Image: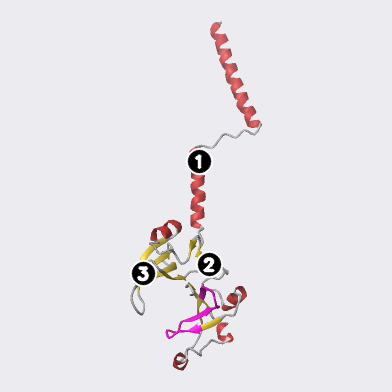
Amino acid sequence: MRKVIICLLVIGLISCRNNKVSQDNSNGYIPAKSNTNKEQTEESIKEEKINNQKIVLSESKIDTFSIPFREKDMLMDLKNYYKSYSVQAKIGQRDGPDFPYIDIVKNDGKSIAFFSFDYENNYKLDEIRILDSIATDQYGIRVGDSYQKIIEKRTGDLKNSTDHHQHTYLYTENSNIYYEITGDLTITEDMLENLEEFELSEKQLQKCTVEYIIWRKRN
């Protein structure tokens, strides 16, 4: 008889406990998530932000960095910020001395942008060049945009000039951001001999698109 009473008491306790859980659930009780699930969610959000990382070039900064940079080695600062991409220190070649630059590269190996430094002072920023449409400038212009889009988004008197290497640039006075443009253009030797007077017509410009977005500090 004593065993029967004990069994009944145990069954009663279990029933009360189950009723308490059911009541808590009916009142909107939701069991707390484990720390592991919370950490996984936070990590997923962090990874999503990194994968959606954008690059925006402004007149006086690029993303969170003021430009020109302080004269210091910027490689690790840029690596730590642009975690979506590969950030590499390289040596560039052109007419004249070789120069150091930092390249921001996508997973497919294509460059998005690079930061060129003075060949005499490796920590002095000389130029930023945007090469991919992932990046944009503060005016909303991207590589590949048409001349028409530039004149819609930029205010001020747009001018153009061409150098001896037949690179044509579009710019406004007092702006650090300008555009190298390309199109179906024919530039003759006579034109190159008088570059100071040479300027593309509006009709020629209408056929042009942005090849590079360039930042260079104006004195």
In the figure, residue 202 lies in which quadrant?
A: bottom right
Q: Which residue has dot 3 on it?
A: 121
Query: On the picture, is 171 further left or further right than 75?
Result: right
Q: Which residues are magenta?
A: 161-178
Residue where numbered disc 1 is placed: 37
Above or below, comparing residue 95 to residue 32 in the picture: below
| Upstream in sequence: badge 2 or badge 3 | 2
Give the camera-side residue of 198 and 181: 198
Q: CA distance from mark 2 to mark 1?
A: 39 Å
Any mark on residue 58, and which? 2
Instruction: Give neighbour class at mark 1: few <14, some 14-19, many 20+ (Cα, 10 Å).
Output: few
Answer above or below: position of 8 versus 84: above
Q: Amino acid at mark 3?
A: Asn
Name the residue located 63 percent from the left edge and 31 percent from the top edge.
25
Identify the residue shown where x is 49% and y is 57%: 51
Q: Is residue 16 above or below residue 169?
A: above
Callout 2–callout 1 Cβ contact below 8 Å: no
Res 83 visible: no
Residue 142 x/y as whole percent: 53, 70
Q: Quadrant of residue 18?
A: top right
Q: How many marks?
A: 3
Circle 2 sits in a helix, a strand or a loop, which is it?
loop
Viewer-proximal residue among 160 and 135: 160
Gap in Å between the C-alphas at discs 2 and 3? Answer: 24 Å
Of residue 114 and residue 218, the one placed in the foreground of this image is 218
Residue 23 visible in the shown view: yes
Chain-order first, disc 2 or disc 1: 1
Callout 1, which amino acid?
Answer: Asn
Within 10 Å of disc 2 (Cα), the crowding (few <14, some 14-19, many 20+) is some
Extreme residue toward the top, this view: 1
